[in-house]
Amino acid sequence: MKALILAAGLGERMRPLTEHTPKALLAAGGKPLIVWHLERLAARGVRDVVINTSWLARQFPKALGDGTPWNLRIRYSHEGDTPLETGGGLWHALPLLGNEPFIALNGDVWTDFDLARLPAQPAGDAHLVLVDNPPHHPQGDFRLAVDGDVYDDGSQRLTFAGIGVYRASLFDDWRRIIGSAPGAEAEPPRFRLAPLLRAAMAEGQVTGEHHRGRWTDVGTPQRLAELDRSLAQPQG
């Protein structure tokens, strides 16, 4: 099974920390955020990892190389100076990921979620990990039904953790779904993943699970500092 780590963002909310360092290479608990992902992917049995890059892209191969320290094979999907957003980033990386289901992780989250729990063959086009709504996102994103299906409606919503398993078929009809959204006609195209997920949910093609353990969206310098402090404390 292959994996993609989304690390192309500009990190604007993390300034000034990201003026000279990509967000995914910022350190917490003594190592870059992306290294936590690499270690967990290796423990899951993944061997091939694609990292999408844009802002300060040259720093990634300098810091991570070809993945040998983690017994991984890393390849880079460079998006140019303008990030392609989540959907465009996944679509752009598909030639490196192949036709089998793949794991995708947001490079700016930290979690103790065990990636071994993810299905190698999701029932539909996508399988998402959801978490309790954090204070900065109280409205949540999606509803997880008792049978494991995920929907875009309902009041009891959870937050998408930025962890999922996807099939390439999720992108089969992306041009119709995205329509004339800004960036869709660019080359390469730039678009968000959420509209594709919502369209797949309407067709009953998205499953999910609720992770009740630790998870942090490292979106601000304050949250990065809080995570760093928590990782420095012994865990019971």
Image (cartoon, rainbow, N blue to C red):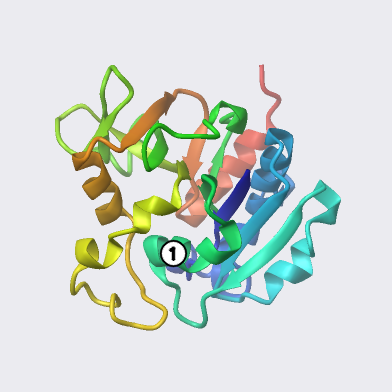
Q: The N terminus appears in which quarter of the rendering?
A: top right
Looking at the picture, tell me which residue is in the foreground, 200 or 29: 200
Residue 163 appears at what percent x and percent y? 48, 42
Q: Is residue 60 visible?
A: yes
Looking at the picture, tell me which residue is in the foreground, 197 or 122: 122
Residue 80 appears at what percent x and percent y? 52, 81
Residue 145 appears at what percent x and percent y? 26, 23
Rendered residue at 33%/23% (across/down): 148
Q: Which residue is mark 1?
A: 91
Q: Is residue 17 visible?
A: no
Residue type at mark 1 is: Trp
Write down the quadrant of residue 25 in the picture: bottom right
41 lies left or right of 87: right
Looking at the picture, tell me which residue is in the foreground, 24 or 78: 78
Rendered residue at 26%/68% (across/down): 175
139 lies left or right of 23: left
Residue 149 appears at what percent x and percent y? 29, 28
Question: Compared with residue 115, is residue 15 higher up or lower down, i.e. above or below?
Answer: below
Question: Compared with residue 75, is residue 38 higher up or lower down, i.e. above or below?
Answer: above
Rendered residue at 44%/69% (across/down): 12
Question: Compared with residue 31, is residue 188 higher up or lower down, i.e. above or below?
Answer: below
Q: The C terminus appears in which quarter of the rendering?
A: top right
Looking at the picture, tell me which residue is in the foreground, 90 or 18: 90
